[in-house]
Amino acid sequence: MKKKVICYIALISILFTFLNANVIPKEVSAKAEERNNTLQCNEYTQEVNIDNEKIIYLTFDDGPSYKITNRILDILKKYNVKATFFVVGSQIKDREEILKRIYEDGHSIGLHTYTHKYKKIYSSQEYFLKEMTMTSKEIEKIIHIKPMAIRFPGGSKKHLNKELLDKLHKENYKVYDWNANIADGVTPNLSIDQFFRKATNVKNKSQIILLMHCNYDNEKTCEALPKIIEYYRNLGYQFCTINDSTPEYYFRFK
């Protein structure tokens, strides 16, 4: 009798374990499947890994330019890193192949107005929007995509307000400023070490949008870029591109 009881207990225990394994974990399994469907944002894919809070967006303004943009693209390709290029519409003419290369290499493209001339672009909200639209159409003609990420020349501070933001959102534009800046737009001839120190002076930020430039005079930026990439890679940062799912980031306004 005791042996039968022990056998029944063992059988019930096995049956309970089987049911537990096949019924209860379904919710866990579903969560795991959902988690696995979230692409990792590393050198191979470009969506955020929710388990990794360290993210850096390398962004380059003012291109495309003949020599510098191609040099930067070569470096990014060597390190298998993707970036975001905020392009100026008037810079595209005769540089269509560079724009195509940016896109074909897997980088993302944003809008940085058509003329980059402050007096024009900030003369009115309507003209600002017009320049973004002009640049978007120019890009669409060449690579058949319509970028919606925009960056204000000089940043949105003193230019962006609720009224303009509402107008931009109505047109489905998103604004991206930065929270780290190597200052190569203003002082392009700083030393490599100076650029590096500025690029890494982020005070433990978990998400970084780093402002750099790829204009004709940004040769030193090219020289500093490998060191910057290696630094953040060694710290475990993911290199991401700004895309449709990237939350907006703009300077505060009243």
Image (cartoon, rainbow, N blue to C red):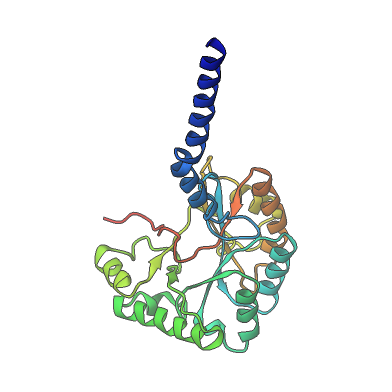
Indicate whether 204 appears above or below 196.
above
Quarter of image, res 98: bottom right
Q: Quadrant of the C terminus?
A: bottom left
Q: Position of residue 246 (x, y in %)?
A: 45, 60
Asked whether the viewer can see residue 95, the reply is no
Q: Residue furthest front?
A: 1
How many badges with numbers are in the image? 0
* Observer-nearest of 193 and 243: 243
Q: Residue furthest right?
A: 78
* Observer-nearest of 175 and 218: 175
Q: Residue at x 50, y 40 (%)?
A: 22
Asked whether the viewer can see residue 19, the reply is yes
Indicate whether 247 appears above or below 152.
above
Horizontal side of residue 164 vs 11, given as left or right: left
Q: Residue at x 68, y 67 (%)?
A: 72
Q: Position of residue 135 (x, y in %)?
A: 46, 82
* Observer-nearest of 194 and 177: 177
Q: Position of residue 183 (x, y in %)?
A: 56, 58
* Observer-nearest of 176 and 116: 176
Q: Position of residue 108 (x, y in %)?
A: 55, 69
Indicate whether 63 appears above or below 52.
below
Horizontal side of residue 2 vs 126, given as left or right: right
Quarter of image, res 101: bottom right
Indicate whether 52 appears above or below 76.
above
Quarter of image, res 221: bottom right
